[in-house]
Amino acid sequence: MTQQAPQTTSEYQSTLASKCQGVARNLSYNDPVVGSAKQTLIEASHALDSSAVRVHKKRDGLLLINARGKSRYMTWRERIAYLLLGTTEIRP
C-alpha cells in the first residue's frame, strides 16, 4: 500500500464534489425519493466546487477559477471585498 501525500482543502473539496457527481450520475429521476437524493448530490457538488476557488491577477482584472477549472472575472463588489478583507467568500 503506497502512501499518498495529504490533500489540500481545495483538492479534497474537488475530489468530494467529483464523487458526489459520480454517484448522482448513476441515479435516476424516476423514483421521487431517488430523484430528490440525486438533486441534493448535484447541489452539494456545485456548492463544494464554488467554495474552492483560486484568484489569479490578470491584466483585465482578478480571475476566479473554481475546483473544476471554470473561470470568471470578479465583480466590483467581489474585488472590493477581496482587496479589503482578503477573502473571496461574499454573502449577500
Image (spheres, rainbow, N blue to C red):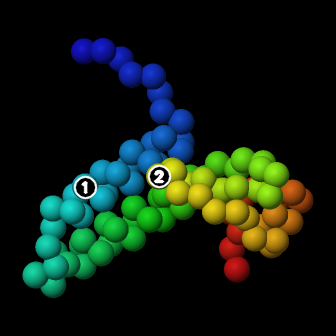
Is 78 drawn above or below residue 30 in the view shown? Answer: above
Q: Residue furthest front?
A: 59
Residue 89 spot, x, y in % from top left = 68, 63
**What kind of element bears circle 2?**
loop
Give, as a three-letter code, the residue at label 2: Arg
Residue at the image position 78 percent from the left and 48 percent from the top: 57
Q: Residue furthest top?
A: 2
Q: Residue at x 15, y 62 (%)?
A: 26
Q: At numbered mark 1, what does the secondary structure look like: helix, strand or loop?
A: helix
Assess disc 2: are there few (<14), some (14-19) or many (≥20) residues with their C-alpha within 10 Å of its C-alpha: some
Residues at marks 2 and 1 touching, judged by CB atoms closer than 8 Å: no
Label located before the other in sequence (2 or 1): 1
Residue underneath mark 2: 68
Whole-number angstrom distance, CA of label 2 to CA of label 1 = 14 Å
Front one among 75 and 85:
75
Residue drawn at (82%, 71%) of the image: 76
Tell which residue pokes out farthest to the right in this image: 84
Q: In the rendered structure, which amino acid carries the disc numbered 1?
A: Gly
| Residue 88 left/right relative to 53 | right
Give the percent coordinates (x, y) of residue 92.
Answer: 70, 80
* Above or below, 59 relative to 2: below
Estimate the x, y position of residue 54 in percent, counting from the top left: 64, 48
In the displayed structure image, the side of residue 76 where residue 27 appears, left or right: left
Q: Which mark is residue 22?
A: 1
Instruction: Point out the image quarter for the N terminus.
Output: top left
Q: What is the quadrant of residue 30 in the picture?
A: bottom left
Q: Quadrant of residue 60?
A: bottom right
Q: Position of residue 77 (x, y in %)?
A: 80, 72
In the image, residue 35 sits, relative to residue 1, either above or below, namely: below
